[in-house]
Image: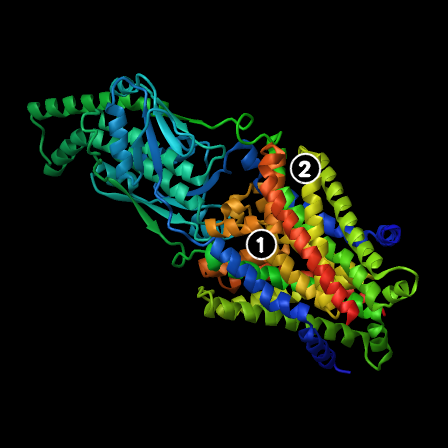
């Protein structure tokens, strides 16, 4: 019996199962849509702050208002810091301190946790104070005085045009492509445990077919499932979610195929480790749940600490996401992602070798 | 009732004899909670975001370029920035790709010379295109650096311009010109010296106390887990209820239920026994997860009776849901497919993975009407916000309404199936 015959028979059976259909086609669509909409790129709301002037003079408060307004911050005045939102308190003696070129300490009333918006406001506030110092007087507080621009900032793109890969569908489609490919191929290992429990595997071993062909056939079934998953998500990304895929689409497809092969092999290995299909499936789910966030599939790794980032670089889901992100955002080619591809190849060889040794009827 | 209890006890014993599957499912919320804490816990506990990593490529190697680097590493953003050498554009590209840096600042060759000659010059900023938040912070800080630099240059511009003019004309200055340049240089020096106060600029951030008003979930770690763990536990309970209910379905498909019906036990007793088994099992697992949460994650268990009431309502819902689906489905695979879809939708909308506070208002309102959304809100209010039970009563009522309605539907569907 040819491995392709085994693979074709298994694939037909798999695609008749409603559960498989749901998790290959419906589940990813729901997750991608839900999180793509939830974390879509939004136009940042303008920053707003209340200035609470405790100084006897309102000169500094007025100068700050003018400079912050020029930076696009909505400024209001208040007697006390409101319980919600941000407030800048100008302490007594601040204006005199500025005029005497002495240091000044403002107080920013904020919320429990620091946010990037707060950081942004804090930087704008520093910039305003420094501008006031550099100008040397506060008389022209109503109109911000700009220094002549001897130095400018030239903002450029490194390699390719900047593409947003951290929000909306541009993030959710590739992230859930990787996650569901990994999850489904790991769970597919439960099929091996089920075939063993039901005696199907024994019947196959009795048939005139070599063990090598059985393993190859089982691997091909899972690899084909991975391809279906990848192709579905790639098409969905273009047709439904209108995202931009990589500069080198064939490199991306080959890279994802290698990832699918590694995941399929690992799934096969899992299938040989358990007698009970349920237990195998749930360990597969647990493994995917563990490796997905660690690999940066649930949130961008930029927002986590250095230890978590390091862990992300050491696991297959992290390699996949890093490679895909590099291809999507930086136009990376085969030479840029070969290390991850080599990792997948190694994972395939190791998993398949152990699975082949352990696969018994 | 005695027969129902016996049947439930029998089911529970069987589950206890083979607990592997349940233990794996219980590990899922613990794992996710642990990862979320490792990822965000430190930021939440300290109230500070991780530092922004910025690469600098100094092609000028001059005093002026050194000032730019100094400003970035020791200026107003010194606590926020980690500055390191880029090692060329290719090196920066690699660091960007790995997510190891958020921005690259290039100080071009001739930067200082251009400033001395009064020509305009650029600092080049490359933002990591794979990131969206931190590159903007880097941009803001560079913007401040440039403002300061431009301000300093403006202070010294007059004598510099005069000197350059003389140099361009190639003649000896007159006494009056020497005097004017000296005066201008002296005044610029005075102004620049006074700018030492720039170093003293400070913005003290005041935050509301965690302990007094809103959040009283014990330690910051306990409050963090107290916020995320209930949603994850409820999500796990839904899947565990599937595993428990599948045993009942297998009893049906493998003929055990038929054998029971031939004994002197009523159909109602068998059905009630099944419900008691799933509900008791879920409550025991909830209690176990709560204990682990308390010991491992320092979650303070406040109002245990209130939590038990919420747990019971949710267990009734989960048991009812699984039994209703099992009544409708013909095979185990059918049950798994439907349950997977329903649990996923309920968990997404109910905010099991992402706090409902992050949802848009309309979705948040819907989320609070789901059984897990309402249960999660009530649990967090009791555990973290130390609200009295009366405060969470509407949420508890929502959970119980779902529990009673879904369980009643399951009983009706089960009876219809048996009659058929």
Quadrant, the N terminus of chain A: bottom right
Q: B8 or A202: nearer the eye?
A: B8
The location of residue A102, given as percent across then percent down, is: 30, 18
User: Relative to A203, is A191 on the left or the right?
Assistant: left
Specify which label sits upstream in the sequence, 1 or 2.
2
- Identify the element where label 2 is drawn: helix
Q: B143 or B336: nearer the eye?
A: B336
Kindly report which numbered mark, 1 or 2, lies closer to the viewer in this rendering.
2
Identified at 22% across, 36% down, the residue is A146
- Residue B39 quadrant: top right
Q: CA distance from mark 1 to mark 2?
A: 25 Å
Q: A338 or B385: nearer the eye?
A: B385
Tell which subunit mark 1 falls on: B
Q: Which mark is residue A178?
A: none
User: Relative to A39, is B336 on the left or the right?
Assistant: right
Are labels 1 and 2 assigned to the same chain? yes
Label 2, on which residue? B306
- Residue A151 quadrant: top left
Identified at 19% across, 22% down, the residue is B187
Q: Confirm whether residue A44 shows in the render.
A: yes
Label 1, on which residue? B348
Query: How many neighbours does mark 2 have within 10 angstroms: few (below 14), some (14-19), or many (20 or more)?
Result: some
- Identify the element where label 1 is drawn: helix
């Amino acid at each position: 019996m040819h491995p392709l015959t085994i693979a074709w028979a298994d694939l037909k059976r798999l695609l008749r199962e409603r559960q498989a259909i749901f998790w290959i086609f419906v589940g990813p669509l729901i997750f991608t849509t839900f999180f793509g909409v939830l974390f879509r790129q939004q136009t940042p709301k303008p920053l707003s702050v209340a200035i609470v002037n405790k100084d006897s003079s309102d000169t500094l408060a007025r100068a700050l208002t003018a400079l912050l307004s020029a930076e696009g911050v909505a400024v209001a005045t208040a007697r006390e810091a409101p319980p919600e939102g941000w407030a800048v308190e100008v302490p007594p003696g601040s204006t005199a301190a500025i005029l005497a070129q002495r240091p000044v300490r403002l107080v920013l009333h904020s919320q429990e946790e620091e946010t990037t918006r707060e950081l942004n406001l804090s930087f704008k506030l520093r910039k305003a104070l420094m501008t006031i110092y550099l100008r040397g007087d506060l008389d022209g507080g109503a109109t911000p005085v700009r220094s002549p621009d001897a130095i400018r900032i030239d903002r450029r793109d490194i390699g390719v045009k900047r593409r947003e890969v951290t929000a909306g569908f541009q993030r959710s489609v590739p992230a859930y492509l990787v996650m569901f490919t990994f999850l489904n191929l790991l769970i597919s290992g439960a099929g091996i445990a089920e075939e063993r429990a039901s005696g199907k595997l024994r019947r196959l071993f009795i048939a005139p077919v070599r063990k090598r062909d059985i393993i190859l056939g089982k691997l091909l079934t899972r690899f084909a499932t991975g391809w279906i998953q990848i192709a579905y998500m790639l098409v969905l990304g273009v047709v439904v979610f209108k995202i931009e895929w990589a500069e080198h689409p064939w490199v991306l497809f080959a890279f994802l195929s290698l990832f699918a092969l590694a995941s399929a092999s690992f799934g096969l290995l899992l299938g040989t480790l358990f007698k009970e299909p349920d237990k195998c499936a749930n360990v597969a789910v647990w493994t995917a749940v563990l490796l997905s966030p660690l690999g940066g599939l649930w949130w961008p790794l930029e927002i986590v600490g250095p230890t978590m980032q390091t862990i992300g670089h050491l696991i297959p889901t992290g390699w996949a996401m890093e490679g895909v992100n590099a291809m999507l955002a930086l136009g990376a080619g085969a030479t840029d992602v070969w290390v991850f591809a080599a990792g997948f190849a190694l994972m395939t060889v190791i998993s398949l070798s152990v699975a082949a040794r352990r696969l018994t009827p | 009732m005695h027969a129902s209890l016996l049947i439930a006890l029998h089911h529970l014993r069987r589950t206890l004899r083979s607990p592997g599957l349940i233990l794996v499912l219980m590990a899922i919320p613990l794992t996710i909670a642990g990862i979320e804490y490792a990822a965000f816990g430190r930021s939440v506990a300290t109230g500070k975001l991780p530092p922004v990593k910025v690469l600098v490529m100094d092609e000028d190697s001059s005093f002026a370029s050194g000032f730019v680097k100094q400003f970035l590493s020791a200026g107003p953003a010194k606590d926020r920035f980690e500055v390191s050498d880029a090692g060329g554009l290719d090196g920066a590209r690699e660091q960007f790709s790995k997510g190891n840096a958020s921005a690259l600042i290039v100080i071009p060759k001739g930067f200082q010379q251009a400033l001395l000659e009064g020509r305009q010059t650029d600092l080049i900023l490359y933002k990591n295109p794979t990131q969206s938040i931190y590159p903007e912070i880097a941009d803001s800080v560079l913007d401040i650096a440039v403002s300061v630099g431009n301000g300093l240059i403006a202070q010294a511009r007059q004598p510099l311009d005069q000197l350059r003019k003389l140099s361009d004309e190639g003649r000896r200055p007159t006494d009056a010109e020497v005097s004017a340049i000296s005066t201008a240089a002296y005044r610029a020096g005075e102004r620049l010296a006074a700018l030492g106060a720039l170093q003293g600029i400070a913005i003290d951030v005041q935050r509301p106390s965690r302990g007094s008003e809103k959040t009283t979930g014990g330690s910051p770690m306990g409050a963090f887990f107290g916020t995320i763990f209930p949603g994850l536990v409820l999500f796990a309970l839904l899947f565990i209820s599937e595993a428990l209910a599948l045993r009942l379905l297998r009893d049906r498909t493998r003929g055990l239920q038929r054998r029971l019906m031939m004994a002197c036990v009523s159909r109602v007793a068998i059905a009630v026994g099944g419900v008691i088994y799933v509900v008791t099992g879920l409550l025991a697992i909830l209690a176990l997860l709560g204990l682990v949460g308390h010991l491992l994650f320092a979650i303070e268990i406040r109002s245990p009776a209130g939590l038990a009431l919420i747990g019971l309502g949710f267990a009734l819902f989960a048991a009812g849901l699984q039994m209703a689906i099992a009544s409708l489905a013909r095979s185990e695979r059918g049950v798994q497919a439907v349950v997977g879809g329903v649990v996923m939708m309920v968990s997404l909308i109910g905010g099991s993975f992402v706090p409902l506070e992050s949802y848009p208002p309309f979705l948040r309102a819907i989320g609070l009407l789901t059984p897990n959304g309402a249960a999660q809100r009530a649990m967090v209010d009791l555990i973290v916000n130390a609200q009295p039970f009366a405060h969470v009563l509407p949420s508890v009522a929502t959970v119980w309404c779902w529990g009673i309605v879904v369980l009643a539907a399951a009983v009706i569907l089960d009876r219809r199936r048996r009659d058929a």
